[in-house]
RNA sequence: GGCCGAGUGGCGGAAUUGGCAGACGCACGGGACUUAAAAUCCCGGGUUCCGAUUGGAGCGUACGGGUUCGAGUCCCGUCUCGGCUACCA
């Protein structure tokens, strides 16, 4: 906090008994917040309801917060103020505005707090929500609080569970072509599981076989997936709770990867739709790109390498038989046991595939390990299983792996290639096995060099190719020649009849040729994986599922759904959840009456004890706001049609990938199943930039107190000696600028560091919105956050900047209020007189500036224009009401409390929230004359005044008559004249 | 390493998208008011050189090139900072 304090709150003089006429933010803000609440000013009428605005609907949404125990952060009000301005502006423009707020309230912190203190997460959550609500109300946001929701409300998660059942009931048919309610034709659709065609041979096997066949195709399915099991803590950890070193965040205990039965959502089925339908939404290209990269579509081919049925030596002979069979039967959808299927984006390098690699978790590893190699392979796989993904990537600078002892046959060259196991191949991508082409893949090259495997070049680089940095780094010397890998495209080499063919053509030809031989097929792969949808936690939505048990009380793998009319499935009451020392979820220890049930047919049932991840509730909350109290459906179809899609969605960039991808996925499933009418939920998306702490200037000192220039500091240590250095905070007057760097005043050789850091408790630079409001008021906080700079940009906080906007608001106050009077009175300068032409021009310039600023979300420039207005009017002794009133309306979306108070003072009795937005009169915008620059050879040499409507030749004539210009033109040859009406004149001359 | 974004006064930033660089705010300096201070109001400012008083000339948007009558804005290359991502075959 700054030392000097604004007068509004801390006036030393005795308080007058009457209303203080000074700008007193706290009094005004409390008053109007109360007024809005009493009058239900911002309650949004439902479509068709009496009193609903006739204008078009406008749905503006904030990403709802996780109500943490720390309360609101200054980052929150940034986006919330932006959307609030858009909404308030929208209302004044006659739009029917939906602007809700709620809580993403399931999550780990409340659960951990519960384990430590015994307080139920429900209570912690309620308390935190109350704090957040109070803080948001204190900032004067125009939410319709009647629509408030929390993901933890049973009435809400009722429908989260219901949507899960929809996912469970859906399979994806990639073939179906259909036209949706949006009139678009698409191929591929999520359909009811009852419509899944069952092959006759499955039907023949009976009901259980049919159920299992269906279960394997649902969008929600069960799968063994590794979890972070920490034996010491006796609990499973979320990825965020595991450090980069593979230790538990709390206590630094080792964490193992353990497979556990979990629920997955088949988001990959929608990968193509998620990719393609991104084109139609109004998001920045960089966020779209982020999503595209995350989905990571690649095109290539699946190729089968023959491995025979055993480890026999007759591989070469049986290979030709196998090939003949394949030529007749074609490429099977599911590979048989006699082949190893790989995915490659470079089928053109097939002739250079000199070995193969399996991921350690590949199911063929055991089978392919020969007796001599079995022990080494088993040891390697066991070691790999213990490593986290991070370890695997980190340690693997040195590419490790072991030979299985087995061979496969390269389908094009007919050569035997060794099969290895290595953890640089991921089990979860492609087929979990690769053909290695060391000459043309950096990772394969590195591995081959390390393990002495054959490298065959099959692509000739194009003329003039220079190896890239990474390629050079991997250079090796063979005899007296040096070789590098080449990963680019070129022409074929050592590739039989394909020699000389360009890469692109080769890819296509060989895929087709192998395809007709039944050896390969074109394939598409995604980086995107199916979504691991279960967590081993208490504080999350329970799954609406029962497991069938066999006579021994074991899960059969068959599942029954909870009937929709029995939803929601509540969390068990009076249950003391503590880590129980097993990887299974805490709910596994829930009371019997919650956990077990006997079905009408006598089958023993056990509840699913995993819970849903925090993402679940945030996947569809935007829908519920449109109909938050609906008891019979997750949303009324008419309301859905009316309000969707969200017109503007604002939130932090940290959700640019996952949250948006997940909710788009759910939305598309609901769309396919006919529950929503739009294919995409969010029409326009804006990410606000992070707010950093105040800028800090830091210098470094060594042990003896000598300054060390930042050039010699690497992550807090001396670059040469490695000595730990002490960072010292400096005041602005201790440093100065020297060229491009900032240096100590006392020694210009010592460069210092000057930058702003992310706000964090440990750095002590966290700004609490409560303090700012206490000190300057909500209007100042709102205004400052918008004035800092463009919404999307990262920007440092500055407390004196807050003071700047506070002073502006005070000036606006004194524009209209006589602050010397004993009571609230209009300033004598405010008069009912005709405004001057100049005043009108100023007003209308402000109207365009503010209107355009809001519409393009450049709030900072909109505020600048209002500052110019108030600066100008402050200087004038007569301030016509006719320009002040519209100005108050322009200011109102930004500083609503102050604006309401002034509006009231100007004699209005109603809130200004629904006053019509001031209308622009273009005619009043311009003067009769404009001053334009006159250039000679592109340099400004003078200025002339010309009529606004002057044509190019007319304004040129004016310029030529100007004394100083005429002087400069005299004796020179005018080569060319550029005369842009109303802009400038440029004479190109030669002496 | 890859991808994305950004570099403009002491600081946050503006510039109608190729047309007067530095709007507006902060910080700073000067003045008015005041016994004094705070608050408020008014004025000032990119920089170098010459004139030296009112003026004039040059250089300036990270750096080096280019296109153009004209570039902060477009093109090529380089550097720095920030964010995301990390063996995806």
Image (cartoon, helix red, strand yellow):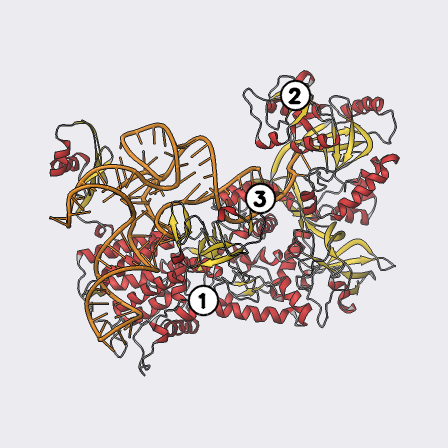
Q: Are marks 2 and 3 on the same chain?
A: yes
Q: Which mark is residue A274?
A: 3
Q: Mark 2 sits on what residue?
A: A481
Q: Report the front residue among A9 and A725.
A: A725
Give the residue number, with chain letter if any, for mark 1: A43
Rendering coords of residue A514 (x, y %) = 70, 24
Instruction: Give the image quarter of residue A340.
Output: top right
Q: Quadrant of the C terminus of chain A?
A: top left
Between marks 2 and 1 in the image, the one whose residue lies nearer the viewer? 2
Q: Quadrant of the N terminus of chain A?
A: bottom left
Query: Residue visible at 12% across and 34% down?
Result: A967
Q: Look at the numbered discs 2 and 3 and tell me whether their residues touch, using CB distance below 8 Å.
A: no
Chain-order first, disc 2 or disc 1: 1
Label placed on residue A708: none
Q: Position of residue A9 (x, y in %)?
A: 37, 74
| Label 3 SS | helix
The quadrant holding residue A327 is top right
Up/down of A647 relative to A12, above or below: above
């Amino acid at each position: 906090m700054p030392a000097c304090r604004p007068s509004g709150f801390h006036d030393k003089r005795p308080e007058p008994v009457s209303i203080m006429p000074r700008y007193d933010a706290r009094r005004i803000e409390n008053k109007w917040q109360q007024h809005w609440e009493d009058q239900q000013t911002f309650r949004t009428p439902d479509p068709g309801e009496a009193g609903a605005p006739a204008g078009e609907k406008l749905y503006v949404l904030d990403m709802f917060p996780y109500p943490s125990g720390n309360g609101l952060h200054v980052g929150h009000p940034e986006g919330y103020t932006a959307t609030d301005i858009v909404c308030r502006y929208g209302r004044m423009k006659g739009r029917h505005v939906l602007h809700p707020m709620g809580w993403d309230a399931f999550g780990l912190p409340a659960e951990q707090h519960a384990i430590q203190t015994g307080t139920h997460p429900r209570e912690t959550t309620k308390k935190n929500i109350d704090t957040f609500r109070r803080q948001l109300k204190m900032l004067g946001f125009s939410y319709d609080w009647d629509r408030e929701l929390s993901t933890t409300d049973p009435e809400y998660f009722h429908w989260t569970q219901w949507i899960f059942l929809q996912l469970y009931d859906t399979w994806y048919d990639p073939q179906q072509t259909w036209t949706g309610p949006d009139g678009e034709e698409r191929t591929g659709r999520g359909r009811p599981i009852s419509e899944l065609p069952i092959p006759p041979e499955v039907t023949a096997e009976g009901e259980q076989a049919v159920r299992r066949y269906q279960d394997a195709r649902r969008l929600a399915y069960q799968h063994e997936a590794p979890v972070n099991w920490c034996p010491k803590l006796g609990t499973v950890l979320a990825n965020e709770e595991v450090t980069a070193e593979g230790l538990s965040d709390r206590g630094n205990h080792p964490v193992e990867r353990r497979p556990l039965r979990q629920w997955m959502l088949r988001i990959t089925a929608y990968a193509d739709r998620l990719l393609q339908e991104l084109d139609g939404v109004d998001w920045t290209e960089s966020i779209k790109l982020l999503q595209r990269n995350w989905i990571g579509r690649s095109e290539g081919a699946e190729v089968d390498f023959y491995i025979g049925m055993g480890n026999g030596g007759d591989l070469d002979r049986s290979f030709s038989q196998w090939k003949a069979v394949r030529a007749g039967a074609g490429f099977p959808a599911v590979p048989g046991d006699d082949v190893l299927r790989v995915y490659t984006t470079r089928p053109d390098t097939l002739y250079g595939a000199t070995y193969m690699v399996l991921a350690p978790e590949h199911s063929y590893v055991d089978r392919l390990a020969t007796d001599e190699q079995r022990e080494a392979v088993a040891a390697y796989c066991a070691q790999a299983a213990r490593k986290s993904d991070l370890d695997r990537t980190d340690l693997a600078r040195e590419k490790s792996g072991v030979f299985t002892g087995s061979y496969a046959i390269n389908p094009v060259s007919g050569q035997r290639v060794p099969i290895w196991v290595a953890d640089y191949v991921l089990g979860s991508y492609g087929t979990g096995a690769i053909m290695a082409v060391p000459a043309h893949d950096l990772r394969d090259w590195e591995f081959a060099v390390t393990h002495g495997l054959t490298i065959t070049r099959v692509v000739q680089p194009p003329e003039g190719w220079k190896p890239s940095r990474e390629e050079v780094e991997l250079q090796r010397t063979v005899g007296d020649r040096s070789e590098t890998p080449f990963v680019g495209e070129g022409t074929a080499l050592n590739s039989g009849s394909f020699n000389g063919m360009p890469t692109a053509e080769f890819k296509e030809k060989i895929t087709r040729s192998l395809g007709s031989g039944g050896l390969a097929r074109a394939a598409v792969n995604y980086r995107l994986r199916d979504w691991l949808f279960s967590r081993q936690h208490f504080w999350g939505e329970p799954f609406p599922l029962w497991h069938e048990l066999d006579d021994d009380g074991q899960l059969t793998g068959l599942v029954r759904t909870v009937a929709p009319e029995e939803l929601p499935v509540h969390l068990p009451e009076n249950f003391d959840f503590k880590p129980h020392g097993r990887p299974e979820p805490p709910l596994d220890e829930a009371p019997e009456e919650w956990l077990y049930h006997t079905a009408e047919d006598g089958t023993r049932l056990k509840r699913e004890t995993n819970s849903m991840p925090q993402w679940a509730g945030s996947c569809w909350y935007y829908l519920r706001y449109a109909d938050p109290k609906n008891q019979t459906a997750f949303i009324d179809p008419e309301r859905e049609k009316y309000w969707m899609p969200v017109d503007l969605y604002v939130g932090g960039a940290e959700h640019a990938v996952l949250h948006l991808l997940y909710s788009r996925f759910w939305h598309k499933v609901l769309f396919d199943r006919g529950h929503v009418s739009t294919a995409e939920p969010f029409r326009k998306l804006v990410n606000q930039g992070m707010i950093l702490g105040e800028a800090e200037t830091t210098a470094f000192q060594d042990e003896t107190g000598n300054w060390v220039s930042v050039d010699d500091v690497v992550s807090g240590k001396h670059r040469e000696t490695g000595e730990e250095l002490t960072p010292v905070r400096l005041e602005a007057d201790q440093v100065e600028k020297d060229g491009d760097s900032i240096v100590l005043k006392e020694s210009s050789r010592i460069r210092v560091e000057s930058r702003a850091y992310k706000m964090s408790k440990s750095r002590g630079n966290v700004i609490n919105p409560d303090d700012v409001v206490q000190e300057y008021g909500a209007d100042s906080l709102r205004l400052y956050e918008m004035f800092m700079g463009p919404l999307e940009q990262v920007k440092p906080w500055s407390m004196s900047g807050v003071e700047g906007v506070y002073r502006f608001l005070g000036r606006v106050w004194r524009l209209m209020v006589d602050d010397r009077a004993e009571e609230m009175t209009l300033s004598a300068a405010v008069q009912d007189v005709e405004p001057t032409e100049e005043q009108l021009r100023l007003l209308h310039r402000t109207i365009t500036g503010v209107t355009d600023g809001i519409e393009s979300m450049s709030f900072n420039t909109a505020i600048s224009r209002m500052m110019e207005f108030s600066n100008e009017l402050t200087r004038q002794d007569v301030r016509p009401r006719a320009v002040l009133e519209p100005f108050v309306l322009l200011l109102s979306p930004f500083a609503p409390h102050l604006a309401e108070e002034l509006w009231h003072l100007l004699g209005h009795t109603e809130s200004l929230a629904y006053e019509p937005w001031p209308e622009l009169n273009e005619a009043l915008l311009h003067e009769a004359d404009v001053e334009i620059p006159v250039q000679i050879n592109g340099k400004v040499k003078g200025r002339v005044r010309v009529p606004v409507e002057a044509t190019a030749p007319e304004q040129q004539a004016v310029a030529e008559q100007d004394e100083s210009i005429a002087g400069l033109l005299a004796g020179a040859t005018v080569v060319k004249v550029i005369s842009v009406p109303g802009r400038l004149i440029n004479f190109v001359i030669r002496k």
